[in-house]
Structure formats: structure tokens, C-alpha cells
Image (cartoon, grey):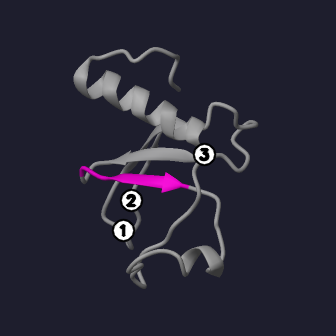
Amino acid sequence: MRQHSSDEDDLTATFFCTDPNSQGGVECETFYETDRDSWIVQLKKRGPKVRDQLVALADDETFGEMSGRTMDVFVRKYVRERYGIDLGGTPN
């Protein structure tokens, strides 16, 4: 699924994978690949106590928390699609 760019951002995001345990897309961690050779990650917000632990977070940067299971799906799918190596499992 492609999400086309708006006037504010010059990129197109394409769905890559999501948390395999998500409940119908509600509050799910999701990776999107862009046409600018980058990634967008949809994450759960965390507050100022977490922000204060991060090094050099710029005003135009943000952060979120991602589960190990979503990261596992991302890595498995990325390695399979980029390098043709199947690490096992069934990535979304």
C-alpha cells in the first residue's frame, strides 16, 4: 500500500511490515519503505523521561518504542528481499 507525498514532504511511503501480533492495525508498530532510500517507523510515543536518555535528539527528530517481535519480522523480511536469504519464520 502506497501513501503518496503531500506538499510538506517530498517522499512516497510504501508499507513493508507490521507487528505480527497486532490487533487489526490498532496501535501497531509498522515499517514503511520510502522512495528516498529510507525508512519510516510508526511507533508508540514515549515521554520526556525516555527522551532525556537519548543522545543528541534534534528538534526535528522523534522516537518511539518497538517490540523485539516487530524488529524480528523486519530483519527477516529485509534479509530475504535484499539478499535472498531465508532466515526462517513467516514475515508479514
Separation of marks 3 and 2 at Cα, in angstroms: 28 Å
What is the total number of numbered labels drawn onto the structure image? 3
Foreground mark, 3 or 2?
Answer: 3
Foreground mark, 1 or 3?
Answer: 3
Q: Secondary structure at mark 2?
A: loop
Residue under label 3, please give it.
Answer: 67
Residue 9 is left or right of residue 41, and the answer is: left
Q: Is the stretch drawn in magenta largely helix, strand or loop?
A: strand
Task: Count residues near mark 3 (Cα–Cα under 10 Å), then give few for <14, some for 14-19, many for 20+.
Answer: few
- Using the image, determine if residue 58 lies above or below residue 31: below
What amino acid type should be assigned to the residue bearing mark 3?
A: Ser
- Give x and y (percent) for residue 6: 41, 65
Q: Secondary structure at mark 3?
A: loop
- Using the image, determine if residue 77 lies above or below residue 38: above
Task: From the viewer's side, name the closer residue of 82 and 56.
Answer: 56
Check if mark 2's residue and mark 1's residue have beta carbons within 8 Å: yes
Query: Is 39 in the magenta?
Result: yes
In percent of the image, x 51 and y 67: which residue is there? 63
Residue under label 2, please give it.
Answer: 5
Check residue 9 in the rendering and tell me which mark sits there, or answer none: 1
Task: From the viewer's side, name the closer residue of 25 and 1.
Answer: 25
What amino acid type should be assigned to the residue bearing mark 1?
A: Asp
- Give x and y (percent) for residue 89: 51, 16
Task: Count residues near mark 2 (Cα–Cα under 10 Å), then give few for <14, some for 14-19, many for 20+.
Answer: few
What amino acid type should be assigned to the residue bearing mark 2?
A: Ser
Check if mark 1's residue and mark 3's residue have beta carbons within 8 Å: no
Q: Secondary structure at mark 1?
A: loop
Residue 69 is left or right of residue 23, and the answer is: left
